[in-house]
Amino acid sequence: MSGAHLVDGGRMARALRASGLPALWAARYPALADPLAGARAAAHVSGSLGRLPVLYRVGAEVALRAAGLVTRPVPAAKCDRLARVPGFGRLLAVTDSLALYGGLDGEPSK
């Protein structure tokens, strides 16, 4: 990654920040509370979602922004309720998995 996780990341990265999910990951998963791991996690999630086909990408962006409106600030109880909404629960599960993978995988060895 070599610092790429510090770049703005575009629309999907902004939608992810607006969703409040990075703060939720830091609270739920202590390993992602580290700022570097959290930044890598967010970069991996936004990069992965940004590579979806257009309609899925737009849907993911809308869902992330809607989550941000519903969960300001991000209490875990509200996200748990959102996880029961059909479709949105799957998005939360996928973004959690991507965040853990991206945040904990670390820098590539040289």
Image: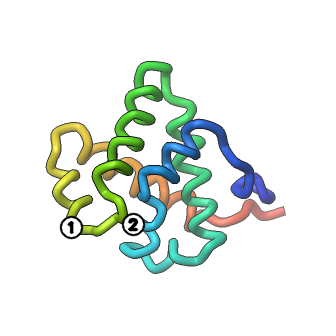
Q: Kindly identify which residue carries mark 2.
A: 24
Few, some or many C-alpha atoms within 10 Å of disc 1 (few <14, some 14-19, many ≥20)?
Answer: few
The picture places residue 85, in percent across and down from the top left corner, at: 16, 44
Name the one closer to the observer, 107 or 66: 66
The picture places residue 70, in percent across and down from the top left corner, at: 28, 51
Compared to 69, does 50 lie above or below?
above
Q: SS of the residue at dot 2?
A: helix
The picture places residue 88, in percent across and down from the top left corner, at: 26, 42
Residue appearing at x 52%, y 53% in the figure: 17
Q: Quadrant of the C terminus?
A: bottom right
Q: For residue 62, which numbered disc appears in the image?
A: none
Residue 78 figure quarter:
bottom left
Residue appearing at x 39%, y 66% in the figure: 24
Name the one closer to the observer, 102 or 87: 87
Q: SS of the residue at dot 1?
A: helix
Residue sitting farthest toward the right: 110
Q: Quadrant of the N terminus?
A: bottom right
Q: For residue 77, which numbered disc appears in the image?
A: 1
> Label 2 vs label 1: CA separation?
11 Å
> What amino acid is labelled 2 in the image?
Leu
Residue appearing at x 39%, y 57% in the figure: 96
Q: Is residue 30 left or right of residue 12?
A: left
Few, some or many C-alpha atoms within 10 Å of disc 2 (few <14, some 14-19, many ≥20)?
Answer: some
Tally of numbered tags: 2
Name the one closer to the observer, 93 or 23: 23
